[in-house]
Amino acid sequence: MTARAHAARGDRWYLRPRVAFPVIGAAVVLTALLAPDQVAGRTGNSRLSTYSTEPQGAHLFYELAQRLGWRVEQRRTPELASDTGVIQALLSPVVPLRMGEVHALLEHVRRGGALFVVLSGGDLIGDSLRVTRGLVGGRARPRDPGDTACRPKTRTFVPLWPDRAVLYDLRWKGPPPSGVETFVHVEPTSAAAPNARTTRSPPAAVGFPYGRGRIVVGSDPDLLRNDVLRGCEYGLDVSAVRMLEYLRDGGTIPRSRVVFDEFHQGFGFQPGTMRAIAAYLGGTQSGHLLFQLLGAGLILLLSLAPRVIPPRDPERIARRSALEHVDALARAYAQVGATRTATMRLLRGVRRRVEHGAARALGRETDEAFLDRAQEAAPALVPEVERIRHALNSPVARREFAGIGAALHRLETTLTRT
C-alpha cells in the first residue's frame, strides 16, 4: 500500500521542486513585466511642504491654487497675518505648534478668517478642535463620484505597489459641531473593517464653521501629496479645490489669499536652545564679552590640562656667583702656594680702584711703575711697597702672605685719601 502511494506521487512530475520552482519564478517575472502599475515607490522627503516637488511634497497643490486665482504665499516666520480674508494653510506640520500659536490660529478663525489644517498626529490643534486621526485605513473616495476624471487603473492580482491614496479616517472626540460638510470619504478595506460597524465610509476631510470663520480638517497628508493629486483616478485634486472654495466663502469678504505655513515645516529661523545661545553670543554686546571670556577660559583650561607628551624642562648649568668664584680661587691658590699670582691679582684690584684719583696712570704701565709712583706720592708707604715687591718676585710663607694683605690695604687707603 505504501509503495503504491509513493509510486502515485512519483508520477506527478509537476510537483517535483526542479519543475515547480522554475514555473513559480517565471510567473513572478511575467507578473512584474505585464502589471499595468507603472509607478515606483515613494522616495525623498516626506514633509508636506509646498517647496517640495518630490512625490510626497505639496507643490502641486500650491500651483493648483495659484492657477485657479488664489493669491498664494509661503510664510517662513511664526507671525500670523491679521487680515481676516486670509486662509491659513497648516499642512501636517513637522515642528510642533505651541499652545500660544494654536490659540492665535483659532482666534484668527473666530474673527472671520479660515484655517486649512492637515493633522500630523498628536498635535495640539487637533486636541483643541476635539478631532483626531482614526485607525481605519482605506482607499480615498471623493464626495461626488463625478470628481474622478478617469477610471481607476486596473490592478492585477499581484500589485507591485500599494495604492497611493490610502487614508485614515477622522474621529471626533465628542459630539461633532453643527454644519459639518464632508469632502472625502474612506472606503475601509476588508482587513480594516472586519465587522459591519466599520463597513460604512467614514470621513477623511471635513469642513465646519467656527465662530465667524471656517475650518477644513484633513486626516492624512496623502490628501494633498503630489503623486496623489497627479493621479486623475483618485479625484482628490477636485476635492482639494472644493475645500478651498468652502474656505473662501461664508464670510463678509471672499477669502482669496492662501498663506501656507512653511515655518512649521522646518523652514526659516527656528527658535531652539542652541540657536538662542548662538543669537545671544553673536548679536549682543554682553554676549560678545561672554564669548570672549569663554574662549579665554577654554585656552586656560587647555594650558592646564594634562598633555599626552609632558613638557621637558631645558637643561641648565648652574654657574657660581662671583663670591663663590673668589673663594674657590683662594682655596686653589692656597693649595699650590701661588703667593706671587695671588699678590699680582690683589695688586691689580687695588690699581683698578685707586687709579681714578691722584695715582691715575698716564698710560699703560707695569706694576713696578705703579709702585714707584705710589712711593713718590706717599713716602710713608716705603715699607709696604718693598714688602709687596718682594711678594711679586718670590714666594713667601703663609704667615708673611697675611701681612701682604695688610700692606695692600694700607696702600689703597693712603692713595685714596691723597
Image: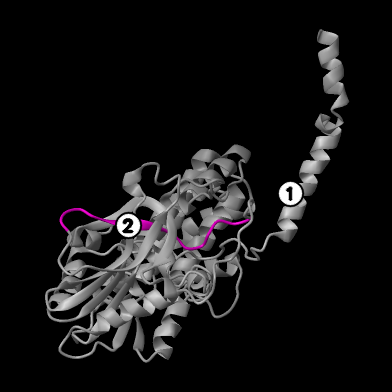
Above or below 400: residue 271: below
Residue on which the image places disc 1: 28
The residue drawn where x is 51% and y is 62% is 164
Using the rendered image of the protein, determine whether residue 49 is visible from the camera's viewpoint: no
Q: Residue 178 at x, y = what percent? A: 15, 66
- Tell me if 177 is positioned left or right of 69 in this view: left
Q: Nearer the viewer, residue 187 or 29?
A: 187
Above or below 156: residue 87: below
Q: Nearer the viewer, residue 292 or 251?
A: 251
Q: Picture quarter containing residue 109? A: bottom left
* Tag of residue 202: 2
Above or below 291: residue 193: above
The residue drawn where x is 58% and y is 48% is 315
- Circle 1 SS class: helix
- Circle 2 SS class: loop
Q: Residues within 10 Å of mark 2 (few under 14, many from 20)?
A: many
- Tell me if 337 is positioned left or right of 109 in this view: right
Quadrant holding the N terminus:
top right
Amino acid on which the number 2 mark rests in the picture = Pro
Amino acid on which the number 1 mark rests in the picture = Val
Q: Residue 31 at x, y = what percent? A: 72, 54
**Is 69 within the magenta?**
no
Q: Residue 333 at x, y = what percent? A: 58, 44
Quadrant holding the C terminus:
bottom left
Using the rendered image of the protein, determine whether residue 127 is visible from the camera's viewpoint: yes
Q: Residues within 10 Å of mark 1 (few under 14, many from 20)?
A: few
Magenta residues? 160-175
Q: Nearer the viewer, residue 117 or 7?
A: 7
